[in-house]
């Protein structure tokens, strides 16, 4: 902790740099930007069929609408109609065949949005309807995949299961989730001189938008500049999907010769763009009398949708989190990314991790119910520990394990054992309302599971008045990345935060960036910014040493000044002096995560630089007559290393948990038999509101727990891990249900535990 008068620095609770603008409505999002005269608005014409050959497209009627400047189809794309982030063959406009209901087939640009919408309805498409694959089961049966199955192996699971004293098998699933960012997908493309295109995109991945736009326009990357000041939420939904929206806007800007903006309406956003993958699981686990797992076999099948997008990486992370906090001596995990005629699913906070953890937590409970043991005793029998109980199914040694410390910490803070007894006593005397309580520990791997993505760049300028311009490859989506990186630079120069201005992420300032994702925004960009700042600081130190006639080692930056013994200069004075001495005050910085490697073929390696840990205890009540449920209390202990900013981190923990609560309790995507998503707006798709936040909600950040691995000021990533803490809510609902049969029966109750599903489970558990 810095005890100085500095109004900045790390490990301190500075507010989000846009907090005031967020609450007063003055924060500028793309749709708020003053329109350049002539700007066209875009509307999409989409497929009404889940699978159909496109026989012809007649644009005459749409073109005839006054105000329409362009109507484009796949045939009009100047470059390559493909924006696949990993593989290839992922068109922005359906080419020859439409593969899901909502698949964009044509795009219309007009003087205003309403005209574009009316014209889009007049695009006449003749289809030959083909047979769709709509369910995961169907895809599995027909071996319809977007990529080769992924297999992870440790030891011999089949033999271990066969030899174990006990074994159980089960099937389960979990639902998908819409991102429901407040600001939907949006991009504004502005043609400039020659073939240049400036694109304002609500994207987590400016570089990928740059590439996608360049490919679709058939121009080199240096002709495209992508800028993003902020997103109104992203949650993974704007990691790859934003590229589709931006590329369509760019094509219409090119064809119409005017700026063109595509802002998807909420219903279209939900129908046209991807979400969290729903999964189907089949597992078999062998264990001994204490509940210790001997072998675990899991089949994971994810609904990838019509194309691969990021699905194989999501599946990779699911397989890498199917151990959660437990040592699985013999594991056999198989992951199938199923090709279905539904929208292509994508990144969502946790990126497969939450889905992977559903199975193991279920298996733990299955073991406990089967043996009549306490769930926590089964957890304890299996936690990672000292060698040989410290190797993951993918070969990474868990060398920073604090699971039991975190579990003990939260159990004590939340008075877990006593409250479990109180819940049991309450249930004895309450015939209709039943309570449940459960704990979940979380271990989440930090780093992109694709090695090349673990790099970042930054650009820092110090101006002669001592103000600092900071740019880095990360994007701001509300998570507080900008203030954290500014804190890092403030710490390096020992100057107040308000001297530092973070400029919008832009591909012409910091090139070849990774998505701001995998929770690693501050880890990666913080290190790159520190590198840049330190380069300038070193040069300024040289100038100061010369000025004071001392060795560089005697120069100290503190409290907005530079000291050499009793003498000092203000930071701006030294900046001016450095300029006068013709010393550069601008630098780029770079960082790549050390010590990680991964072989996607064998699914072995050390994909994660470190793990972030956490635990949550949730208490719920269910109504056994209606299935309705509420979270009464949640207690969280989250490991943020030495937090860069405890206020921001607290917000991330609360928000992540509540978003996870939505996923496990109420958010239900519902497709009808014709492949149409029927939950495409807030009236039918329920996300948690303020009244769903647990009335008792105690969030603690683990104290005195610096990251043993050398991350930026020993902090840990916090963006995604807390979402998985909400699995405790699902487990608590399951606990309430299983309490009806004195915890001796194991029933199916998949997330989301909606009232319908809870009621069905109540009836099943009560059936003779
Ligand atoms: N917080 C807010 N407010 N809005 C968001 O869109 N996205 C989450 C998380 N927290 C998100 C958020 C996701 S999916 C990730 S990967 C991280 O933020 C990304 O930012 P970071 O790496 O800087 O933590
Ligand atoms: N998280 C988020 N995005 C990614 C990842 C990941 O682990 N790997 C590739 N893209
Ligand atoms: Mo977050 S799902 O990695 O964008």
Image (cartoon, rainbow, N blue to C red):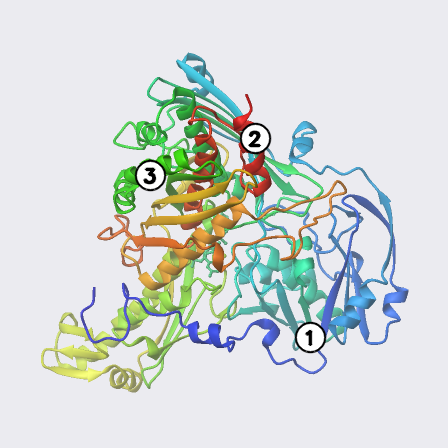
Label 3: state its secondary structure: helix
On the rendered structure, is 305 left or right of 746?
A: right
Residue at image mark 2: 763
Q: Nearer the viewer, residue 722 or 640?
A: 722
Residue at 46% across / 30% down in the picture? 740
Question: Do we see residue 158 in this rendering?
Answer: yes
Residues at discs 3 and 1 in contact (Cβ within 8 Å): no
In the rendered image, which quarter is residue 587 located in? bottom left
Q: Nearer the viewer, residue 199 or 115?
A: 115
Where is residue 451 shown, x and y percent of the image? 44, 46
Which mark is in front, 3 or 1?
3
Q: For the residue with label 3, is its CB less than 8 Å from the closest atom of ligand 1? A: no
Residue at 63% across / 36% down in the picture? 338
How much space separates mark 2 and mark 3, taking CA atoms? 24 Å
On the rendered structure, is 477 left or right of 586?
A: right
Quarter in which the C terminus is drawn: top right
Label 2: state its secondary structure: helix
Q: Relative to 216, does residue 708 appear above or below in the rendering?
A: above
Where is residue 660 shown, x and y percent of the image? 48, 49
Q: Relative to 392, does residue 82 appear above or below in the rendering?
A: below
On the rendered structure, is 152 left or right of 68?
A: left
Label 1: state its secondary structure: loop
Q: Which numbered circle lies on residue 259?
A: 1
Q: Nearer the viewer, residue 168 or 277?
A: 168
**Sequence-first tag of 2 and 1:** 1
Residues at discs 2 and 3 in contact (Cβ within 8 Å): no
Residue at image mark 3: 422
How much space separates mark 3 and mark 1, taking CA atoms? 63 Å
Where is residue 258 shown, x and y percent of the image? 72, 76
Within 10 angstroms of label 3, few (less than 14), some, or many (20 or more) residues? Answer: some
């Amino acid at each position: 902790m810095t005890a100085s008068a500095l109004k900045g620095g790390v490990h301190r609770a500075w507010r989000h740099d846009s907090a005031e603008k967020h609450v007063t409505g003055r924060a500028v999002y793309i749709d708020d930007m003053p329109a350049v005269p002539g700007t066209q608005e875009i509307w999409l014409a989409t497929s009404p069929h889940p699978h159909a050959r496109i026989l012809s497209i007649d644009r005459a009627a749409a073109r005839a609408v006054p105000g329409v400047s362009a109507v484009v189809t796949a045939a009009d794309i100047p470059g390559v109609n493909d924006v696949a982030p990993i593989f290839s063959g992922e068109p922005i406009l359906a080419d020859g065949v439409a593969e899901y209901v909502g698949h964009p087939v044509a795009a219309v640009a007009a003087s205003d949005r309403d005209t574009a919408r009316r014209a889009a309805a007049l695009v006449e498409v003749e289809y030959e309807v083909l047979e769709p694959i709509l369910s995961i089961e169907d895809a599995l049966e027909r071996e319809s995949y977007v990529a080769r199955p992924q297999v992870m192996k440790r030891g011999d699971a089949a033999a271990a299961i066969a030899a174990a004293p006990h074994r159980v098998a089960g099937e389960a699933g979990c639902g998908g989730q819409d991102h429901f960012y407040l600001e939907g997908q949006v991009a504004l493309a502005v043609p400039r001189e020659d073939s240049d295109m400036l694109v304002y995109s609500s994207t987590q991945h400016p570089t990928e938008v740059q590439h996608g736009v360049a490919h679709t326009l058939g121009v080199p990357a240096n002709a495209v500049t992508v800028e993003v000041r902020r997103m109104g939420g992203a949650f993974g939904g704007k990691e790859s999907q934003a590229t589709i929206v931006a590329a369509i806007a760019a094509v219409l800007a090119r064809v119409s010769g005017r700026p063109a903006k595509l802002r998807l309406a909420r219903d279209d956003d939900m129908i046209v763009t991807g979400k969290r993958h729903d999964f189907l699981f089949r597992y078999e686990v062998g264990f001994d009398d204490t509940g210790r797992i001997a072998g675990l076999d899991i089949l994971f099948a994810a609904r990838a949708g019509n194309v691969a997008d990021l699905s194989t990486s999501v599946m990779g992370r699911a397989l890498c989190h199917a151990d959660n906090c437990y040592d699985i001596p013999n594991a056999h995990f198989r992951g199938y990314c199923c090709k279905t005629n539904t929208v292509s699913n994508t990144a969502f906070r946790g990126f497969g991790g939450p889905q992977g953890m559903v199975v193991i937590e279920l298996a733990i409970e299955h073991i406990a119910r089967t043996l009549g043991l306490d769930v926590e005793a089964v957890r304890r029998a299996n936690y990672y520990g000292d060698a040989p109980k410290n190797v993951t199914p993918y070969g990474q040694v868990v060398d920073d394990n604090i699971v039991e410390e975190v579990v003990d910490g939260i159990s004590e803070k939340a008075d877990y054992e006593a409250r479990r007894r109180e819940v049991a006593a309450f249930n004895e005397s309450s015939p209709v309302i039943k309570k449940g309580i459960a704990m979940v520990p979380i271990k989440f791997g930090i780093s992109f599971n694709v090695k090349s993505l673990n790099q970042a760049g930054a650009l820092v300028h110090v101006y002669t008045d001592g103000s600092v311009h900071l740019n880095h490859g990360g994007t701001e989506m509300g998570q507080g990345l900008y203030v954290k990186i500014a804190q890092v630079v403030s710490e390096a120069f020992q100057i107040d935060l308000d001297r530092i201005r973070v400029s919008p992420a832009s591909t012409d300032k910091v090139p070849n960036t990774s998505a701001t994702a995998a929770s690693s925004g501050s880890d990666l960009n913080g290190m790159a910014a520190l590198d840049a700042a330190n380069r300038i600081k070193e040069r300024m130190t040289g100038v100061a040493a010369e000025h004071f006639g001392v060795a560089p080692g005697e120069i100290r930056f503190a409290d907005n000044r530079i000291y050499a013994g009793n003498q000092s200069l203000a930071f701006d004075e030294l900046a001016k002096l450095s300029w006068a001495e013709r010393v550069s005050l601008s630098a780029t910085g770079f960082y790549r995560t050390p010590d990680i490697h991964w072989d996607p073929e064998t699914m072995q390696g050390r994909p994660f630089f470190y793990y972030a840990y956490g635990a949550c205890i949730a208490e719920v009540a269910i109504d056994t007559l209606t299935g309705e449920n509420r979270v009464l209390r949640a207690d969280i202990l989250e490991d943020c290393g030495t937090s860069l900013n405890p206020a921001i981190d607290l917000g991330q923990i609360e928000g992540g948990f509540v978003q996870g609560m939505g996923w496990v309790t109420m958010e239900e995507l519902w497709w009808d038999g014709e492949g149409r998503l029927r939950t495409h707006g807030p009236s039918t798709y329920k996300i948690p509101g303020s009244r769903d936040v647990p009335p008792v909600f105690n969030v603690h950040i683990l104290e005195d727990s610096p990251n043993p691995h050398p991350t930026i000021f020993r902090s840990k990533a916090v963006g995604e891990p807390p979402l998985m803490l909400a699995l405790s809510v699902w487990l608590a609902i399951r606990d309430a249900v299983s309490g009806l049969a004195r915890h001796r029966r194991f029933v199916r109750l998949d997330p989301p535990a909606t009232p319908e599903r809870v009621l069905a489970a109540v009836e099943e558990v009560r059936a003779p």
